[in-house]
């Protein structure tokens, strides 16, 4: 039974400002259908200062009881099911259409879902499922108000929530899906739904939570990164797998109070999404811990192994040595590394504060761009990442260089081994569009599998955008902003879990470059902007900072100091693309003075695999 209302929108998140300087305009969400809103007919109550009740009793008094509507009533409410009142996608291939309407005896808007093709050949089944869900009443639910049956017509009536559409993300429009799933699986799914609802009520009730519930199609769904659902057919829904999935979802809620849960009891559908409205689920059934551990490792495999789920320094050293000898890592362990990294990055803010104690040091590296053997050289020169020797790699880990998989797995493995030993910032190349063109996507398909392409794309969206060292040094991949007055609090508030937008704060963080002249100008890249020393000085003054460190541009000496010493560019890929002849560099900051010590180095030999070997055919023609 489908979700009651395609315009129901679900978000549980800490309240944040409605508007930010620069905004997040143009941010391409994955998927773009989760936003916070309250049901329209509750806004007056909330504005009047009546607190939301954590229980359900008060809600029962405020909403009409579940009832049967006449077809003529609903037709009149929608002006004869007028096209102008359609609020969902529609067409001959859509299984249902949602209309907004207004009943004569009620001034509130309602949503009416009219099914073009019904999964309920038995009218009694439809009535039983609708009535079961219709008994639920809560301010945390988009409540089902009634139903209508007339001949072959099946309609549901619900509270109207005027935002977006969920329908195309929740339903299999090809007709290949089946609603004939076992009652046993339905019961298990609904049981987990109840448990999660209880946790939402008890654990995270200080936060805004709106949960859409509806009726029962015995299927477990978890929204994947593209916005389409990954289903679990009956043969996969063993008891242990349901428990594993449910447990993982519970852990997500406990660890991250800004998790969104869409619980559809009637469809027996679960969607779990993170605070920005998307979360890659258990696509193809391999992403639970137990399922990863069940991936067979061939007896002849002699490479690095993770014992259990703990990534150790010995493992990372062995893996790097294997990579150096052009041996691959087993996919089972690659999955473990990437998924553990995902868990760590999901919980991090968009701007990360780093504290370097007095007498300690901290190293910042710039672009590496898939030059794995030069990354090994950095570790030879400056030591491996550890709690006593922490690093920040400032974006553009991948693309162009043909050892990007080795680079990213190494950096991610160190992050899993000790999260405080290595910090990772997003660059403009940590994006789908760049990876498709400049080689990382092709390399991942060649060295790992197609499944990893989407997994890496998702994890890249979790990368923080910037870091501040000891409240004095601002580190960002690209540069500064098109408007003055941007505060660190604005950066912290960026909703970063998306593909990079084409404008706004996030875009400028990833793409902008300094210029020698004052003021601002268009970027030579066609995205972001160029900014002068006066812009840098105002930003530092506004935020009580001393220095900007950024990367993003190749420099002959591996670094460049501009804007009266207030901005340093650091680039860590020497002889970039085997063509530029530049040096690489990294910066060591010693506390408490944080005076930058810049170390330069030259390129080292690497196996005879040309840069851009995995890039698009068009680009390889010119390389």
Image: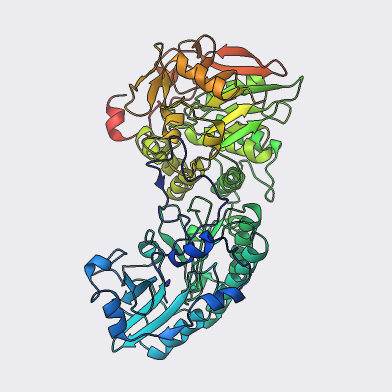
329 in relation to 206, above or below? above
269 in relation to 538, above or below? below
The x and y percentages for residue 154 are 34, 82
| Front residue (pair 480, 46) | 46
The x and y percentages for residue 408 are 53, 35
Here the colouring is rainbow
Q: Residue furthest right?
A: 359
Which residue is painted at 48% across and 25% down in the image?
607
What quarter of the picture does the C terminus occupy? top left
183 in relation to 41, above or below? below
Which residue is painted at 32% across and 76% down in the image?
114
Q: Is residue 402 visible?
A: no
Which residue is painted at 50% across and 13% down in the image?
583
Q: Is residue 24 visible?
A: yes
Which residue is painted at 33% across and 21% down in the image?
524
Q: Residue furthest front?
A: 48
What quarter of the picture does the N terminus occupy? bottom left
Please give the count of numbered marks on the rendered protein: 0
Q: Quadrant of residue 592?
A: top right
The x and y percentages for residue 72 are 28, 84
Q: Quadrant of residue 292?
A: bottom right
| Front residue (pair 537, 333) | 537
The x and y percentages for residue 28 are 39, 45
| Front residue (pair 611, 200) | 200
């Amino acid at each position: 039974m489908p979700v009651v209302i395609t315009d129901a929108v679900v978000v549980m998140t800490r309240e944040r400002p409605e508007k930010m300087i620069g905004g997040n305009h143009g941010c391409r969400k994955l998927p773009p259908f989760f936003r916070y809103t309250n049901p329209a007919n509750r806004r007056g109550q909330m504005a009047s200062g009546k607190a939301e009740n954590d229980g359900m009793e008060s809600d029962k008094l405020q909403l009409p009881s579940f009832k049967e509507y006449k077809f003529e009533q609903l037709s009149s409410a929608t002006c004869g099911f007028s096209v102008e009142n359609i609020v969902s996608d529609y067409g001959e291939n859509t299984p249902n259409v949602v209309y907004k309407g207004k009943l004569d005896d009620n001034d509130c808007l309602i949503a009416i879902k009219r099914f073009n093709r019904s999964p309920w050949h038995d009218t009694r089944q439809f009535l039983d499922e609708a009535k079961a869900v219709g008994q639920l009443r809560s301010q945390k639910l988009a409540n089902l108000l009634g139903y209508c049956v007339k001949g072959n017509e099946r309609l549901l009536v619900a509270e109207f929530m005027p935002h977006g559409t969920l329908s195309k993300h929740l339903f299999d429009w090809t007709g290949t899906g089946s609603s004939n799933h076992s009652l046993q699986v339905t019961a298990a799914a609904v049981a987990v739904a109840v448990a999660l609802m209880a946790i939402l009520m008890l654990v995270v009730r200080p936060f805004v939570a709106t949960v859409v519930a509806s009726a029962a199609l015995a299927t477990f769904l978890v929204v994947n990164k593209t916005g389409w659902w990954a289903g679990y057919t009956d043969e996969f829904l063993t008891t242990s797998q349901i428990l594993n999935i449910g447990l993982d979802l519970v852990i997500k809620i406990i660890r991250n109070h800004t998790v969104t849960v869409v619980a559809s009891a009637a469809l027996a559908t679960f969607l779990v999404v993170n605070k920005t409205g998307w979360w890659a689920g258990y696509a193809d059934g391999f992403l639970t811990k137990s399922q990863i551990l069940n991936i067979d490792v061939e007896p002849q495999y002699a490479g690095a192994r993770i014992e259990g789920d703990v990534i150790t320094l010995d493992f990372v050293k062995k893996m790097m040595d294997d990579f150096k000898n052009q041996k691959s890592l087993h996919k089972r362990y690659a999955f473990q590394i990437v998924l553990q990294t995902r868990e760590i990055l999901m919980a991090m803010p968009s701007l990360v504060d780093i504290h370097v104690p007095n007498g300690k040091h901290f190293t910042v590296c710039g672009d590496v761009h898939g030059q794995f053997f030069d990354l090994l050289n950095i570790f030879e020169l400056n030591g491996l990442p550890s709690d006593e020797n922490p690093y920040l790699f400032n974006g553009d880990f991948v693309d162009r260089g043909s050892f990007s998989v080795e680079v990213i797995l190494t950096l991610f493995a160190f992050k899993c081994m000790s999260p405080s030993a290595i910090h990772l910032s997003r660059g403009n190349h940590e994006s789908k569009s760049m990876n498709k063109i400049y080689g990382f996507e092709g390399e991942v398909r060649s060295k790992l599998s197609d499944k990893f392409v989407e997994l890496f794309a998702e994890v890249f969206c979790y990368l923080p955008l910037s870091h501040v060292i000891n409240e004095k040094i601002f580190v960002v991949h690209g540069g500064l902003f098109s408007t003055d007055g941007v505060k660190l609090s604005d950066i912290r508030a960026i909703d970063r879990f998306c593909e990079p937008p084409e404008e706004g704060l996030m875009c400028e963080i990833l793409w902008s470059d300094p210029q020698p002249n004052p003021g601002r100008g268009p970027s030579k890249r066609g995205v972001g902007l160029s900014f002068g020393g006066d812009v840098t000085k105002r930003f530092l003054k506004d935020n009580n900072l001393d220095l900007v460190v950024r990367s993003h541009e190749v420099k002959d000496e591996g670094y460049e100091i501009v804007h009266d010493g207030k901005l340093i560019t650091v680039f860590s890929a020497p002889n970039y693309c085997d063509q530029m002849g530049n040096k690489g560099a990294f910066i060591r900051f010693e506390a408490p003075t944080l005076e930058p010590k810049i170390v330069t180095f030259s390129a080292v030999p690497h196996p005879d695999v040309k840069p851009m070997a995995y890039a698009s055919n068009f680009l390889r023609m010119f390389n």
